Image (cartoon, rainbow, N blue to C red):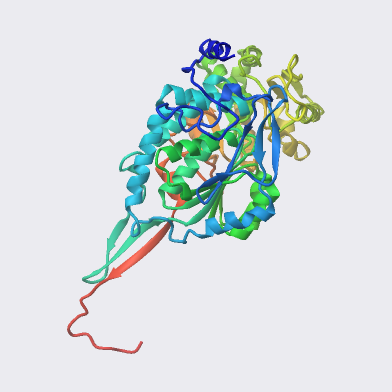
Amino acid sequence: MAARRMQRLLSREFPIPARAFSTRSSVPVMDSSSALAFATVYPDDLSTAHPYQVENLVRGRWGKSLKSSKLPDPLNGGEFITVPEATGHELPEYIESLQSCPKSGLHNPLKNPERYLLYGDISARAASSLKHREVGHFFARLIQRVSPKSYQQAQAEVTVTQKFLENFSGDQVRFLAKSFAAPGNHLGQQSIGYRWPYGPVAIITPFNFPLEIPVLQLMGALYMGNKALVKVDSKVSVVMEQMLRLLHACGLPPNDTDFINCDGPVMNKLLVEAKPSMTLFTGSSRVAEKLALDLKGRIKLEDAGFDWKILGPDVNEIDYVAWVCDQDAYACSGQKCSAQSILFMHENWSSRNFVEKLKQLAAKRKLDDLTIGPVLTVTTKTMLDHMEKLLSIPGSSVAFGGKPLENHSIPDVYGAIEPTAIFVPLKEILKDEHFDLVTKEIFGPFQVITEFKQCELPLVLRACERMHAHLTAAVVSNDVEFLQEVLGETVNGTTYAGIRARTTGAPQNHWFGPAGDPLGAGIGTPEAIKLVWSCHREIIQDFGPVPKNWTSTTS
């Protein structure tokens, strides 16, 4: 048995050295000298025969819950992970833990400043660990097991996370809290502006980037001095559980972060009763709007986006642009908040058979290599029903796709369709009876395509103006006047411009977040961290001396 297992491990496409392990124990799977000594699960061994039990973390202690649920493997339906479901009776411990952090945070510029250096060191060690081939492969495969996407896409998520941690190593954490001073009105007086933590905070993140989003937001919160409660979609929370174990091995104080698995109503109850000073929510607009009300505005949002791309009048690099459009719409099976939801094509592109090129690229996507795969939040029926509603619009047609995937064992609770594009005429899109239907976000491999003439650009811009979510966008053109007009009339927070423009693939080196919303959050950059995870505090120092000729007056 051991010999066969070793042979199987060594023959994999992305092998890692075979070692003794056990997926049924919370004891680390590797010996203490291994780069994977932190790990308590082995991704390629996860199965109904060898399930894994995720644990919650509170007050620095890992543990199970009174209640749990079993998750189906998104590729074959077999139960392979058990996730705790904290109940209302268990919330007091989480509430007390969160409220144990004062509003002034665990550190700030005037309290425990050595912790800025601590987090610079933690980031350096974690970045170095993720750069290790075994560890990077471990997380890429674990991501694939719970949120199926191609190995390249999963590995890119690990790389972005590693680069982020590398960016905030050494002194870079303390530089996030850099203050400024302005001279006062007299000797001994000056005003100093500080970046101040919120203290107790909460982080809620979705399934589609189970490593990148929670790690970047958690570390940003911790850098600024906050204590964080983290809730990741339970379908993929095993990834963050393992990352927290790695961070602990890299020196993260266990009490700085709590980690909970529970259902939505229980989490809502926890937030309302614990009253965190700030909550970061990444996910659906519907839930975001409810939380904004329940938490009385103490929240930052990176909610869903119906993201648009405009192909301008200058047709260049047609094969490259088609490839980028395919990646934007269908990589990760369209399950990116930045995925291309609608494509506005100038007629010059459609006259060059651009849609046919998209069709050919989409046809190359296969379940075998997970370039197309399960849709975790939208069923096949829901997507096909939406397609039929779009096809009832006059002039609409199936550009390509529109059929369920065949020859698979993806459970019915998930979706599985071919990469799909529906053509809808521009003037029909703008009609009041159609607009909400056409601009409904389908979080899967599904996009709308339309065409415009040069004189119809104002109609395209009117459509962009009417959309309610403004996350990412792309203007694919090197025509400067066209770019200036479109960019000047739109608002999306992360907009790519130029012939190589895309809507997805946000790395760690630029702002990623919506615009046009005072609750909008960002991720990944110093500006995003300071905006989301700290507030401005002004301290006016006035030490004197009091003027010798001072006398009291009444005013």
Residue occupying the point 44% across, 57% down: 105
- On the question of residue 383 being in view, the answer is yes
Q: Nearer the viewer, residue 346 or 494?
A: 494
Question: Height in image: 413 above or below 366?
Answer: below
- Quarter holding residue 132: top left
- On the question of residue 487 being in view, the answer is no
For the C terminus, the quadrant is: bottom left
- Quarter holding residue 123: top left
Residue 504 locus on image (x, y percent) = 54, 29
Left or right, residue 285 beside residue 531: right
Q: Nearer the viewer, residue 53 or 413?
A: 53
Question: Height in image: 186 above or below 481?
Answer: below
Left or right, residue 434 beside residue 218: right
Question: Height in image: 415 above or below 433?
Answer: above
Residue 426 locus on image (x, y percent) = 69, 29
Q: Nearer the viewer, residue 254 or 328?
A: 254
Residue occupying the point 70% across, 34% down: 70
Left or right, residue 178 beside residue 334: left
Q: Nearer the viewer, residue 477 or 44?
A: 44
Question: Height in image: 344 above or below 85?
Answer: above
Residue 319 locus on image (x, y percent) = 54, 13
- Quarter holding residue 526: top left
- Total numbered labels: 0
Residue 395 locus on image (x, y percent) = 78, 24
For the N terminus, the quadrant is: top right
